[in-house]
Amino acid sequence: MPAAVPADVVLVGLVDAGITDTGPTRVCPKVTVAAGLSCVILGDPLAAPRDVWVTRDGGIYVTEMGAGTVVRLDGARFTVVASGLDGPIGLREAPDGALLVGLEGGRSVARLDRASGALTVLAGDLGNVTYLTVDAAGAVFASAFDNVGPFGTGRVVRIDPVTRAATRYATGLNVPEGLFVDAAGALFVAEWSPPASVRRFAPGGGSVGTSTVVASDLTNIYGLLPDGAGGMFLGDHAGRVLHQRADGTREVLLDHIGRTGGFARTADGDLLVAEFVDFGAMGRLYRLGNVR
């Protein structure tokens, strides 16, 4: 049962979406979508999808944690790019066009050649790696933790783009998941463990004590992505995708799906949402159009 919507979340004309076959896509079933937005499902069901990314050449890739694979959307189907991975979660594109994959079971960040499927370790012994981001200079940031409890043992690690040295950048987090670095160099990190929140770390990083909470009243956050206008998209275990604007107001864009994983934007601004649902369960890749 979805959690109650916090008082600062405005439900803007949510409407029920039915099911309609439209070739390689179909309208999102049994969900609610904010008025003015479109929603379709892309491709086949996926085994516990955790993250999605759109490469600079327009390719759409997804990590299937439940299958240990990275897949690419080819028309109406997903094609396996790499298999046998140990808990793939985070997914981003490196400056050279390779894919970067966060491996929770492998406790590492790996580089995946999209053409050959060859996988090489970029940095290891990082803890249980969850999500990834890459800053303007090409440095890779990975959220990681050792155990769900005790709290306060999670961190974000920065991997130098030249030396590949991994150093702790933000510490004291409660199971960190989604993250991004904004244009000013500040790091934003979603904490999965209650009380779930999004924290902002000033450029250079630091500890939880030096960070600022910029989003709260959420349920176990996974997905986090900047909106390009000072706000962010968030996804939580209540089955919601929310847009928190720069002024702090929120709108529910999508509701009543499974647990939300990571997000990505297409070249035309649509929002892609990986529906993780749960470990071992099948999820979907949603595409939200007309996102403001």
Image (spheres, rainbow, N blue to C red):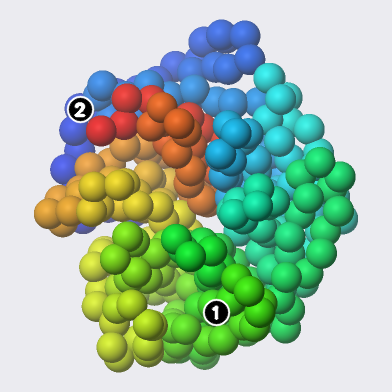
Q: Residues within 10 Å of mark 2 (few under 14, many from 20)?
A: few
Residue at figure coordinates x 43%, y 88% from the top left: 172
Specify the quadrant of the image occupied by residue 206: bottom left
The amino acid type found where label 1 is placed reads Val
Question: Which of the 4 quarters of the picture holds residue 23?
Answer: top right
Which marked residue is nearer to the observer: mark 1 or mark 2? 1
First in sequence: mark 1 vs mark 2: 2
Residue 226: % across, % down:
35, 52
* Residue 180 point in image, percent of width and height: 42, 62
Q: Residue sitting at 55 percent across and 26 percent down?
A: 41
Identify the element where label 2 is drawn: loop
Judged from the image, the secondary structure of the residue bearing numbered disc 1 is: strand
Residue at the far front in the pictured view = 162
Residue shown at 68% from the left, 59% from the top: 101
The disc labelled 2 sits on which kind of residue? Gly
Residue 127 visible in this rendered orientation of the protein: no
**Left or right of residue 274, residue 69 in this image:** right
Using residue 102 as the reference point, say whether residue 34 is left or right of it.
left
Image quadrant containing the C terminus: top left
* Mark 1 vs mark 2, CA separation in Å: 40 Å
Vertical position of residue 124 compared to residue 6: above or below: below
- Circle 1 sits on which residue? 157
Work out whether residue 94 or residue 6 is closer to the camera in this orientation and state it: 94
Give percent across and percent down for residue 267.
45, 31
Q: Which mark is residue 241?
A: none
| Label drawn at residue 13 | 2
Residue 209 shows in the view: yes
Give how far across and how far down residue 122 sits, in percent.
73, 70
- Residue found at x 58% / y 76%: 160
Mark 1 crowdedness (10 Å alpha carbons): few <14, some 14-19, many ≥20:
many
Looking at this view, is 14 or 264 the one in front?
A: 264
**As displayed, is residue 153 above or below residue 246?**
below
